[in-house]
Image: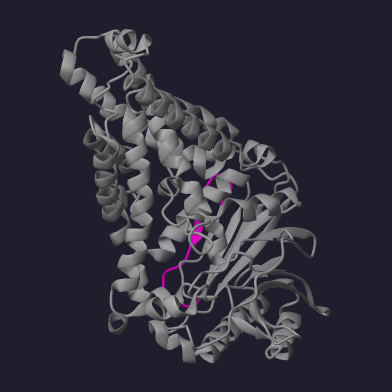
Amino acid sequence: MILYFSLAPRAWWWLAPVAFAVLGLALHGCRFRQGAGRGFLFGLAFFVPQLSWLQDFLGADFGPWPWLALSATMALYFAVAAGLSAVVQRLPWGTGWMAAVVIAMETPRMWFPFGGFPWGRIGFTQPEGIFLPLASFGGAPLVGFAVVLCGFGLSRLVLRAREIGWRFRRVLIAPGLAVVLPVVLGMAAWASVDGNAEAGDRTVAVLQGNAPDRGLALLGERDVLRDNHFAEFRRLAEQVRAGRVPKPDLVVWPETAVRIPADEDRLGELVNELGVPVLVGALERLPDGRNQNIAIVWQPGEGPGQRYAKQRLVPFGEYMPAREIARLVTPFTDSGEDISPGTGIPAALRLGGTVVGASICYEVAYDQAGRDAVRAGAELLTVPTNNAWYGRSEMTYQQLAMARLRAVEHGRAVLVAATSGVSAIIRPDGTVARASSQFTATTLIDTVPLRRDLTMADRLGPWAEQVLIATATGAVAAALVLWVRSRSSAWPASGFLRRRGKVDTNHYES
């Protein structure tokens, strides 16, 4: 539960390392199976309350089983991570290997099962605080590693100090470094976080038309959603004409606010009336009859232009990976068609004189979407999303925290446009310049810097993730080799290592 309380909307980011300090204490002296069991309980305590918004979405009539099943599945990753951490913790510098194992296990969680579920990555607990600047060097994996390393270092420091007393001893140096080094590096990394404009600035408007707070009942009220956004867009145009708000250089709409081509004529009239380019979230009917979830550029006087189709689709929401299983966990099984995913084209769209990247809703949890857009020239980023399904839950705040980390990771302003909130304008340093309330109709307007320089995270790509996977794999392999050798009386060095305190043969017994 401690790790859950570190999540948004609470600003208690410092609880995340405390949670891993507690886990480190719980794993002390454990074998693999004991560690896995304790890791599973740790994962359940984190995911069950975190993913409670899924129950808000499905409603009481559908029952808690989809929510609990997903939570348990995600907790299994923590079980494996904790079990392997128990294996590597007796190696020299064990805290580092343990932290690498925990973050490395987030990678398979991003692609299995059914395309993965990256919600709740450790880095996403840090939308502010000491560790956030590390995102500009290694994204969410490096931030998460710093959090876990600090936490495990705290646990080892407590254990060592308890064993020898609070007198300074050399054995306290390694755990002390594990605690101090991530903090020092995080503070030093602030110098790399630059929010200054490199290519001018833009006055932007983020539209939030609102939707009824009815959960699944919104399935039959897509016209209400569309009409609300048309009405808010018309109010924006009237306010601009009256001089009550500045005329924006571009406007961003939420995800699937309209249908294409059904709403094209009405949308075109309103865009021409305002006279500025708009990035519209739409559900588009393709010529072959399939639907796509798209962000489309609408230029005044020209109509639709560039478009980006969502590539990371939500399993059991936007497509059904196994319909017989799906009937057990979702009400959408027989209510609609699968949405067709987009191709691998980066979401770098030109709105007037501005290149804008788009990560549609769920995609903001994945590292690749924003990185590809920035590498393709995006000067600011957008996150069109539809959170109206999830009521007044914490889901939208958790997603906002991801967008804040992405701002620092890519050194770009991020515009979050949500149907019913929370919408936000985020500066490149991760601070929220403007934000809306939930279930209100409003438009956020502010001036944001445009940036073209690439952060180290974007220049180097997924280096942190790859290094951590290699490190974790090597540590587990080394621990297993030591365990096998310690079981063999023919290995002469085993006695020497035991005397040196390097290997605890009892620990490696399964």
Relative height, residue 175 to residue 134 (above, below): above
Image quarter (top left, top right, bottom left or bottom right) of the C terminus: top left
Q: Residue at x 30, y 72 (%)?
A: 65
Q: Which of 43 and 175 is in front in this view?
A: 43
Tell me the chief SS of the magenta region: loop
Residue 69 in view in this figure: yes
Quarter of image, res 73? bottom left
Residue 264 is left or right of residue 155, and the answer is right
Residue 419 is left or right of residue 354, and the answer is left
Q: Does the magenta stretch include residue 109?
A: no
Number of numbered discs overlaid on the protein picture: 0
Name the image colouring.
one colour
Highlighted magenta segment, given as a residue range: 427-441
Quarter of image, res 390? bottom left
Residue 183 in view in this figure: no
Q: Which of 49 and 503 is in front in this view?
A: 503
Q: Residue 435's spot in the image, x, y percent?
A: 48, 62
Q: Is residue 431 magenta?
A: yes
The residue furthest right is 302
Q: Which of 281 and 141 is in front in this view?
A: 141
Q: Residue at x 33, y 28 (%)?
A: 89
Q: Which residue is drawn at 55% across and 44% down?
A: 429
Residue 11 is left or right of residue 315, and the answer is left
Q: Residue 459's spot in the image, x, y percent?
A: 69, 38
The residue furthest front is 490
Q: Residue 320's spot in the image, x, y percent?
A: 52, 76
Q: Residue 346's spot in the image, x, y percent?
A: 72, 58
Q: Residue at x 51, y 51 (%)?
A: 404
